[in-house]
Amino acid sequence: MHNMKRFLEIKNRIREVRTLALMGITEAGSGHPGASFSAAEIMGSLYFQVMRFDVTNPFSQNRDYFINSKAHSAPGYYATLSLSGSFPKEEMKTLRKLNSRLQGHPVRYSEAQKHHSVPGIEYSGGSEGIGLSISVGIALANNLDNRNGVVYCLLGDGEINEGQIWEAAMAAAKFKLDNIVAILDRNRIQQDGFSDDIMPLDPVKDKWLSFNWDVSEINGHRVEQLIDELKKKSLGKPKIIIANTIKGNGIKHMANNPQWHGRAPSKKHLPILIKELEGEYMIAPSIIAGDDGESYESKIEKAERVGSDIIHLDVMDGKFVPNTTFFYDTIKELRGITRLPFDAHLMIQNPYDALDSYIDAGCDVITVHVEECKDEKEFEKINNKIISNGVSPGIAINPNTELPEWICRYLDSLDVIIIMSVNPGFAGQKFMPSVLPKMRNLIPSLRSSGYNGYFEADGGIDLSTISSCYEAGCRIFVMGNAIFKSPDIKETIRNTKFLLDSSLEKELLRESESYGIKDDWMKIRKSVLGQFNSVKGIWEQ
Ligand code: DX5
Ligand code: ZN
């Protein structure tokens, strides 16, 4: 079984963290969107999966600790806590207000402070550079008391300018505190400038290595990398994960822009910004496509190299579809070569009987075909099994199939709906345009019924068809031949992202127009719009 649980659900909750943080900051008229967004996946991976803690019993003896040393990520931190059950989401609107429990900088929760704080906050932050020393203290105390809780400490790259950090780093190594895992939110911006200009940190990895820490370096926006590293134990040494992130990630005009370290967006922009967050997409190459002579391993390596988000695995049994591809044993072998999430699309008869093997093989998403669920009961059994094993469940529908009415009772527990745009069986088929009106009806109707999960487009997706599916509301795109038959995969992915990004940009512009704030929006968005100017007429459409 794979390390990660309910991958798509975690991704979705992290998107909600960004939305809630933004709502709080906008309402308050001040706060820190930049660091809230660079650390969203770090905090989400910790709270939604890795850490052992119980917000209803915040002082339990063997809990894991989160010390938010950098503290400037407070709105994102509060949003994460809220989605973990610490306090109602609506309270985010009180951020930074007088008498609110959500102060500009978090305050440690205790009996005495419970009117100024919320359950789960272990450390009062704001002054930089102190949290690692506190972590050393907790870790030493845990060792003395024979408690097995791990201390996770979030550091900012501006923060580690402080001398006290390096004193704590020496102490942690001296006492061999392998119950400390620090995470450096390496967004390369501190306050209102780039850290390379203010105080260069590199070679930052070598610095920590020379302080005798275990060091790893990952992409801090990839939950599969974060979860894997956060769960790996270092023996006899403290550990630090250098998480390369982008400050403001999620909103393009804030991304990597020092001006957005601590600035609130205008209230009238908020609905457009939320739309942008909802526009996040994932690309899922299907490895049955392309040249048959090329190994699956080589295709996965290629897909990973060019920045794919998920690997789509088309399992075909020669009965449900007129073609046979591979089964769970192949998936199990491939599991070892990548951390990328595995999206298994089961085009097989009697999927329930096979579920255990696919769960055991390490799939992160398992989608069954609605045509193979003979009734609601059968689907319920399948769905329960997938969810209870920590895998994201999905349902797929063929072009000529409609979703049964009973699906509305499972909208809360479904992570993805695959809308097939070819009759399944083979890669390289032509996209069926009749599926577009279906997407345009189905997606808003399921959204208005409360479905919050993903829609995935599968079959014949390429540069000529992808934008329409995106505009209809799909956010995961399976691409087979468009990727593996491309003479230049990197270029194809780049062009695909450019198309999707420009679709979103147009949509946001239309939104701004409908609110009567187009000029204002274009002003704030200037740096982003510049990237799309080369596309002739894009803004006139
Ligand atoms: C269709 C499969 C698809 C397909 C994708 O039966 O489920 O995943 O192979 O390949 P392209 O993008 O080439 O249609
Ligand atoms: Zn598929």
Image (cartoon, helix red, strand yellow):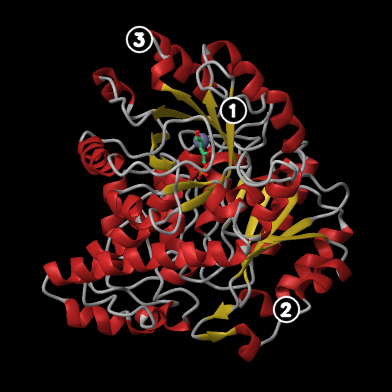
Query: In the rendering, at what x and y percent does residue 75 appear?
Result: 41, 61
Q: Residue at x 29, y 54 (%)?
A: 471
User: Is residue 99 toward the left or the right of residue 319 in the image?
Assistant: left
SS of the residue under disc 2: helix
SS of the residue under disc 3: loop
- Amino acid type for the residue under numbered disc 1: Val
**Residue position for label 2:** 163
Compared to 248, does 465 lie above or below?
Answer: above
User: Which image quarter is the N terminus in?
Assistant: top right
Mark number for residue 241?
none
**Mark 2 C-beta closer than 8 Å to ligand 2:** no
Q: Residue at x 29, y 75 (%)?
A: 538
Q: CA distance from mark 3 to mark 2?
A: 64 Å
Mark number for residue 315?
1
**Residue position for label 3:** 375
Between disc 1 and disc 3, whose residue precedes?
1
Which mark is nearer the camera, 1 or 3?
1
SS of the residue under disc 1: strand
